[in-house]
Image (tube, grey):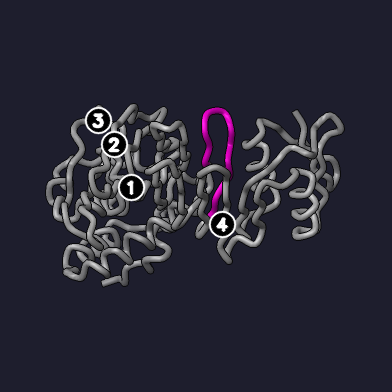
Amino acid sequence: MKRINPINRIVRDFLDGKLTSRQRKAFLNLVQRSEDSEELENIYQNIFEQIENLSEDEVDLLHELLEKEKKTTGIVYRMRPFFKYAAILLMVCGAYFVYQWAQPFTDNIVLTAAIEQGKTVSRHVLPDNSEIILYGSSSFEVLEYTDKSRTIVLHGEADFSVMPSKTPFFVQTESGYFTKVLGTRFTVRDVRGKYSVAVEKGRVTVGRGEEILGILSRGDSLVVDDEVHLYGAGVSPLVFDNVNLEYVLHTVNQAYDTEVRLAADLDGAVKCTAAFDKNLSIIEIVDILCEMYGYTYSINDHRIIIQH
């Protein structure tokens, strides 16, 4: 019998058409036989990271391939004991994400309720298998969960594990703050007049109303009380806390040996709060800055000009 493709290549092999039906079945059998929850978590995390690292075009291709390989939903019922991993396992088995955008949102499912570190914890799953862990008496509402928007209103504090998708995921709070993400793990606290976001993996945008407060990467956190405080992790060497945009570009240019400039009509003194992962390309950093301020950019020779 052929060996199953290495787990750390299974998404890439699927995209490249190298994942055979026999290998898919072998992988499914591997997971179904496993009684080790830690092993399952490692498998899930591995594949989650593979999907998260795909480009936007590759995510679109993944959806197209899955759409072409629709299967009967019978496999879903066999997968119920592995509900947390259903979307990933369905993917490698060649089936479509049958829960994703297939039906309107119904009552969320409480997976477990337990006491962790003195707090009551409840786990909830959304239609695309994203998860919310609520603490204490916290609650949430679903404003919209479609192929256009995934929007949640949080009352209190929660951890989020968001499935990657081309549809943005928004967490809003009663105090007006929001967190926008495509697929990651992060924690939101909105209690006693203090709002905070901590990112476990991926990248999120944090704001209030029309204002972008910061863009965070893995290991970063942001706390808002009377002021905005950004705390950067060691993996984010480029951390800027309420500094001039001109200074941000100067630092980025030195770090990347590039030439990124503001157009003459833009204000270099506008304040910027952001953290950039060391693995980001210069174009990705420019994209983030443009998203924060509603700018665009052009490339002239080796020079990047940020403009209106």
Q: Determine which of the numbered discs, if any, sits on residue 158 in the image.
A: 1
Q: Are marks 2 and 4 in contact (CB under 8 Å)?
A: no
Give the residue pinned by disc 2: 140
Q: Is residue 12 visible?
A: no
For marks 3 and 4, the one nearer the N-term is 3
Neighbour tally class for label 2: few under 14, some 14-19, many 20 plus, Cα within 10 Å = some
The stretch in magenta equals 206-217
Q: Marks 2/3: CA distance? A: 14 Å
The mark nearer the N terminus, 1 or 4, is 1
Q: Would residue 149 be found to the left or right of residue 44 on screen?
A: right
Give the CA separation, mark 3 to mark 4.
Answer: 36 Å
Q: Look at the image and tell me whether residue 184 can be seen.
A: yes
Q: Earlier in the sequence, mark 2 or mark 4?
A: 2
Label 3 crowding class (10 Å Cα cut-off): few <14, some 14-19, many 20+?
A: some
Marks 3 and 4 in Cβ contact (< 8 Å): no
Callouts 1 and 2 close, C-beta under 8 Å: yes
Q: Which mark is residue 13?
A: none
Q: Position of residue 241 (x, y in %)?
A: 65, 50
Q: Secondary structure at mark 1?
A: strand
Of labels 3 and 1, earlier in sequence is 3
Which quarter shows the N terminus? bottom left
Circle 4 is placed at which residue position?
Answer: 231
Q: Indicate the position of residue 134 as horizontal and vertical percent values.
A: 27, 47
CA–CA distance between discs 1 and 2?
Answer: 9 Å
Which amino acid, by three-letter code, is at mark 2?
A: Phe
Q: Are marks 1 and 4 in contact (CB under 8 Å)?
A: no
Tell me if mark 1 has few (under 14), some (14-19) or many (20+) residues whose alpha carbon lies within 10 angstroms of its own: many
Q: Earlier in the sequence, mark 1 or mark 2?
A: 2
Q: Nearer the viewer, mark 2 or mark 3?
A: 2
Local secondary structure at mark 3: loop
